[in-house]
Image (spheres, grey):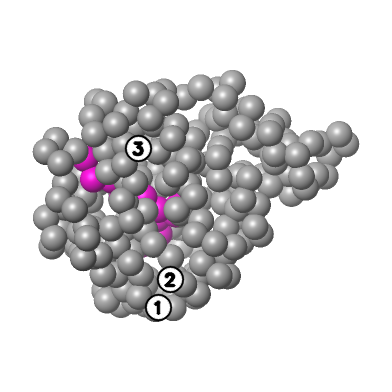
Amino acid sequence: MRDVGRLVADLGDLVLPVECAGCRERRPGLRHGVCADCAAALDGLRPRPVRPTPAPAGLPPCVALGPYAGPLREVLLAYKDHGRHGLARPLGALLAEVVAVAVGAVRPVLLVPVPDTAAAARARYGDHLGRLARHCAGRLRRAGWPVEVRRAVRALPRPDSVTLDSAGRAAAAETAFRVRDRWAPVPAGAAVVVLDDIVTTGSTLAAVSRALSATGGSPAVAAVLAATEKRAPM
């Protein structure tokens, strides 16, 4: 379902700042969110199944656009940590491709973004996954998918995961989420897809999935933009 011209146009619509979000270079005449080279690198990524080792209990099948490296990593950091909100549209479009590959045949989809805590949202210039989910849903609808975004889960205060090791992430995620009282029943035949930007240990995705499963909304799959890769020991 990828529209290469649309992706390039989305990236080209971003006129400021002149620093490329992908390579951080200031190139003469650059008027885009990312340069042509970084746009081509992003366009070359293809969604694939990923699985942390060891995988936490309750983690559904997970599909990622690519590894958390190179231009994808830099664009995500620019979007999340440096307030480059204009990147939400092209990143949302790429996330829509991940969802399409993860779900397979066109059918009704409920997108459930992993929620930020209030503190994380303040630090990251707002609800970054909520914006990605809206753009993701819009792109899927234009491709003929029946899609709804459900804010089914709320986040309780917890440490930022970037400060934690794998054991700390698992412990923090265990009691980090609550399903909202008004989480409606899942329509027959609909796929529940949990959305996140990055998967590392899988603890967060597993915790959200377990919370949803306990209320009758078992996720079919998780869709993310990037997956961290373990480095081989030296």
Gap between marks 2 and 3, in whole Å? 24 Å
Q: Residue at x 70, y 39 (%)?
A: 14
Q: Label 2, on which residue?
A: 117
Horizontal side of 172 relative to 183 (left or right) equals: right
Q: Position of residue 214 (x, y in %)?
A: 13, 62
Q: How many marks?
A: 3
Q: Residue at x 60, y 44 (%)?
A: 87
Residue type at the position of mark 2: Thr
Q: Residue at x 50, y 70 (%)?
A: 120
Q: Position of residue 134 (x, y in %)?
A: 44, 44
Q: Nearer the viewer, residue 47 or 180?
A: 180
Magenta residues, start to end: 191-202
Q: Dot 2 lies on which element?
A: loop
From what the image shows, is residue 109 above or below residue 114? above
Circle 1 packing at 10 Å, graded few (<14), some (14-19), many (20+), is some
Q: Label 3, on which residue?
A: 99
Q: Which mark is residue 158?
A: 1
Gap between marks 1 and 2, in whole Å? 7 Å
From what the image shows, is residue 11 above or below residue 64? above
Residue type at the position of mark 1: Arg
Q: Quadrant of the N terminus?
A: top left
Q: Earlier in the sequence, mark 3 or mark 1?
A: 3
Horizontal side of 53 relative to 13 (left or right) equals: left
Disc 2, disc 3: CB below 8 Å? no
Disc 1, disc 2: CB below 8 Å? yes
Q: Dot 1 lies on which element?
A: loop
Gap between marks 3 and 1, in whole Å? 28 Å
Instruction: Residue 201: say if magenta.
Output: yes
Circle 3 packing at 10 Å, graded few (<14), some (14-19), many (20+), is many
